[in-house]
Image (cartoon, rainbow, N blue to C red):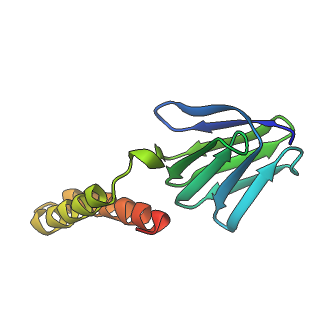
Amino acid sequence: MPDFHFELVSPERLVFAGAVESVVVPGTEGQFTVLKDHAPLMTTLKPGVIDIAESKALLHRFFVRGGFAEVSPAGLTILAEQAIPLESLDAARIDADIKDAEEDIADASVDETRRLAAEKRDQLLELKAALKI
């Protein structure tokens, strides 16, 4: 199968770059698959999992928390708010972090602290929902 260029970029770094066969993207209007010569497209992303197939045997999976995807003749570029390799995630750790964030919300005496803790909890809940754990 022909390859195309793909880049996954987070605010911290270039997460992935290379020639791939396909990428499954969690668009806000629904999940879609990009293959070589896909029609040009720009869309926003919802929290979810990106599946990157370099070949039939080599698959990379990342959780992304929102962002943008652009398909052009040059390939696919995803600018993600956050990108985490799935193999680095642990369900028990996510649950513990959610519990900690909920405790931080309950303990917060300042609105800004409460808002930040709620934002963190919501991000963790999005991650958990996207991973279906």
Residue found at x 23% / y 57% = 112
Residue 17: quadrant of the picture = top right
Residue 30: quadrant of the picture = bottom right
For residue 91, side relative to residue 111 (left or right): right
User: Residue 103 location, x and y as percent?
Assistant: 14, 65
- Quarter of the image containing the N terminus? top right
For residue 24, side relative to residue 91 (left or right): right
Quick check: 103 above or below 73? below
User: Residue 90 location, x and y as percent?
Assistant: 33, 54
User: Residue 67 location, x and y as percent?
Assistant: 58, 51
Quick check: 132 above or below 39? below
For residue 126, side relative to residue 45 (left or right): left
Residue found at x 33% / y 60% = 91
User: Can you name the residue that lies furthest to the front here?
Assistant: 57
For residue 25, side relative to residue 87 (left or right): right
Quick check: 75 above or below 115? above
User: Residue 64 location, x and y as percent?
Assistant: 52, 51
22 and 101: which one is in front?
22
Tell me how many marks there are: 0
- Quarter of the image containing the C terminus? bottom left
111 and 67: which one is in front?
67
Residue found at x 18% / y 65% = 105
